[in-house]
Amino acid sequence: MSERKASVAARLPIRRGLGEAEAAMYIGLGASKFAELVKDGRMPRPRLIDNRRVWDVDDIDAAFRALPIEGEEQQDNPWH
C-alpha cells in the first residue's frame, strides 16, 4: 500500500456504522448537540438495525460537508 493510501486509511473510522455518541465524536461534538443537529435536519437521521439506531459515516460526511463555512455566504439564503 502506498504511503498516501495508508495515511488515508489510518484516518477512517474502523466501522461504517456508528452509535450516536460515536457519531457525535466523529464530527467533534457532544451527543446532545449532535442530537439537536439530527432533529433540525443538519445531520442525517440514523438507519435502523432492529431497534438499534446506527449512523452511516458516508451520510455524516455528506451532511458535514454541507454545513456552512465561516466567512462564506450561504448559497441558499433567500434574503441575499
Image (spheres, rainbow, N blue to C red):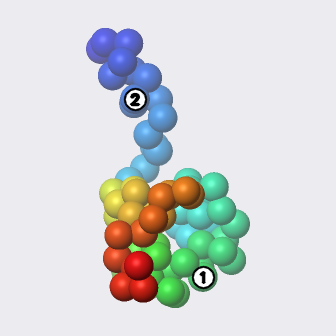
Callout 2 amino acid? Val
Q: Earlier in the sequence, mark 1 or mark 2?
A: 2
Q: How many numbered marks does the figure carry?
A: 2
Q: Which residue is drawn at the image coordinates 48% and 35% (left, top)?
A: 11
Q: Which residue is drawn at the image coordinates 52% and 87% (left, top)?
A: 39
Q: Position of residue 59 (x, y in %)?
A: 35, 64
Residue at the disc numbered 1: 36
Q: Which residue is drawn at the image coordinates 42% and 69% (left, top)?
A: 74
In the picture, measured across the screen, residue 31 lies left or right of residue 80, that is right
46, above or below 7, in the image: below
17, above or below 50, in the image: above
Residue 1, image quadrant: top left
For this orientation, the residue located farthest to the left is 1
For this orientation, the residue located farthest to the top is 2
Q: Position of residue 62 (x, y in %)?
A: 35, 60
Whether residue 29 can be seen here? yes
Quadrant housing the C terminus: bottom left
Q: Which residue is drawn at the image coordinates 60% and 72% (left, top)?
A: 34
Mark 1 residue crowding within 10 angstroms, few (<14) / some (14–19) / many (20+)? few
Q: Position of residue 75 (x, y in %)?
A: 35, 70
Q: Nearer the viewer, residue 53 or 5?
A: 5
Does the CB distance between marks 1 and 2 fall below 8 Å?
Answer: no
In the picture, measured across the screen, residue 74 lies left or right of residue 5, that is right
1, above or below 33, in the image: above
Q: Nearer the viewer, residue 69 or 77?
A: 77
Q: Label 1 vs label 2: CA separation?
A: 30 Å
Callout 1 amino acid? Glu
Residue at the disc numbered 2: 8
